[in-house]
Image (cartoon, rainbow, N blue to C red):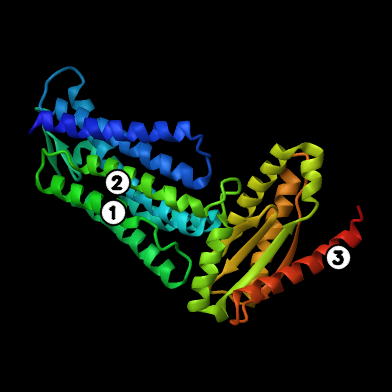
């Protein structure tokens, strides 16, 4: 075991992750869902780097509490292997769809392998040696089921690659989403460390991959509206252009305008107006069905596009949005209420401009009816 190499490798990884945390604090990163998942990956990677370093340093040592510490640090480090893969899958899925409703479903399905591995980790604490064994001399050795950690992590990596590939086929994803910038370094580092025990390359590669992702996501973020957390007009143009070339007959849309949004700004100030936009972003994210995206076009206008939709899905989405608005209005402590005027349409396949015009006309017809019922 090469302790100096381990200290240099993991020390470098710790510095990289700490640097990324510092950047996020300085840039005042918002705590939206995507940011929370990214921070979760950073936190797990940092925990693994620290606990792996400690486990290598005390391996085979003898002092009071050493055995417990060896077991604890190796449990945390090995358990982190699967957890970071799970968080990565959720992060990829949310970055593509930006749907908290979809994310909740993915947590339930993707969480099954994680749960099974964590159960094995708990059983391992009772000295079964299934995942790893610590001898009476406090020496660590891999157990017969240790390979499941790597297999599960690779399963999560494969899922993330599949998710990006499939979303490209349905016209949803952004072509430049950097899935391989994370997966490839992690796989290479994990394989090397798996083959040559005593080398510390796995978590260093994860830290390097997080740096790659941070750099690439600066480009990605140009397609995201910072206030609402939804995609922006620039992305909508990209999306519609791609949808026109793939399955235009299955494309449906909902265009929305916030009723009396100017009153919110005039009465309560623009900071409260920004809060309203953030709340709308949450409501729309929680209302999206499969293969749909929500977009903030400009100001208080929003669009939902369903790439593989039908009439029923369109109406169900409208109902979900109205339910979300109703729940917000009944439970909020904000001084304002929210409502939308909506226009629904199916893409005619001729041009994206005519599609948007149809949505716009139907939305403003509903807007006109709203103002007749609620005169200023």
- CA gap between label 2 and label 3 equals 53 Å
Q: Earlier in the sequence, mark 3 or mark 1?
A: 1
* 376 to 23, vertically: above or below: below
Image label count: 3
Q: Give the residue pinned by disc 3.
A: 369
Contact flag, marks 3 and 1 (Cβ < 8 Å)? no
Residue 183: which disc? Answer: 1
Q: Earlier in the sequence, mark 2 or mark 1?
A: 1
Circle 3: element type: helix
Residue closer to the observer: 176 or 210? 176
Label 2 or label 3, whichever comes before in sequence order:
2
> In which quadrant of the rendered view does residue 162 lie?
bottom left
Residue 290 in sight in this render = no
Alpha-carbon span between mark 2 and mark 1: 8 Å
Q: Are marks 2 and 1 in contact (CB under 8 Å)?
A: yes
| Residue 358 locus on image (x, y percent) | 71, 74
- Contact check, label 2 and label 3, Cβ < 8 Å: no
SS type, badge 1: helix
How far apart in space, not on screen, are marks 3 and 1 (Cα)? 52 Å
Q: Is residue 7 above or below residue 189?
A: above
Q: Position of residue 128 (x, y in %)?
A: 19, 41
Identify the residue at image location x=78%, y=55%. 259
Q: Is residue 373 left or right of residue 298?
A: right
Q: Quadrant of residue 79?
A: top left
Position of 190 relative to 23 (above/below):
below
Residue on which disc 2 sits: 209
Corner quadrant of residue 68: top left
From the viewer's side, name the closer residue of 32 and 138.
Answer: 32
Percent x, y for residue 105?
49, 58
Relative side of 331 to 247, left or right:
right
């Amino acid at each position: 075991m090469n302790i100096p190499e381990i200290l240099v490798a993991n020390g470098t990884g710790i510095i990289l992750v700490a640097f990324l945390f510092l950047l996020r604090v300085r840039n005042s990163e918002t705590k939206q869902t995507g940011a929370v998942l990214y921070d979760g990956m950073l936190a797990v990677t940092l925990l693994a780097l620290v606990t792996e370093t400690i486990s290598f340093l005390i391996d085979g040592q003898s002092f009071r509490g050493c055995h417990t510490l060896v077991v604890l640090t190796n449990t945390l480090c090995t358990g982190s292997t699967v957890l970071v893969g799970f968080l990565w899958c959720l992060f990829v899925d949310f970055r593509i769809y930006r749907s908290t409703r979809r994310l909740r479903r993915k947590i339930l399905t993707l969480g099954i392998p994680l749960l099974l591995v964590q159960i094995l980790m708990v059983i391992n604490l009772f000295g079964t040696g299934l995942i790893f064994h610590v001898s009476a001399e406090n020496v660590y050795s891999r157990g017969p089921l240790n390979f499941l950690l790597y297999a599960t992590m690779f399963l999560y990596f494969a899922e993330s690659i599949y998710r990006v590939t499939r979303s490209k086929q349905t016209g949803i994803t952004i072509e430049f989403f950097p899935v391989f910038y994370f997966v490839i370094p992690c796989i290479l580092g994990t394989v090397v460390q798996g083959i040559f025990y005593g080398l510390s390359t796995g978590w260093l590669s994860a830290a390097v991959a997080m740096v790659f992702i941070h750099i690439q996501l600066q480009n990605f973020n140009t397609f995201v509206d910072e206030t609402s957390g939804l995609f922006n007009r620039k992305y909508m143009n990209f999306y519609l252009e791609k949808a026109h070339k793939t399955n235009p007959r299955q494309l449906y849309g909902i265009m929305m305008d916030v009723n009396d949004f100017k009153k919110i700004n005039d009465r309560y100030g623009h900071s409260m107006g920004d809060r309203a936009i953030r709340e709308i972003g949450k409501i729309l994210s929680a209302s999206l069905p499969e293969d749909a995206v929500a977009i903030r076009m400009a100001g208080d206008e929003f669009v939902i596009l369903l790439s593989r939709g039908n009439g029923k899905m369109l109406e169900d989405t409208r109902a979900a949005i109205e339910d979300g608005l109703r729940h917000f209005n009944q439970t909020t402590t904000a001084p304002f209420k929210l409502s939308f005027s909506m226009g629904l349409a199916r893409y005619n396949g001729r041009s994206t401009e005519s599609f948007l015009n149809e949505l716009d006309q139907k939305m403003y017809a509903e807007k006109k009816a709203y103002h007749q019922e609620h005169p200023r």
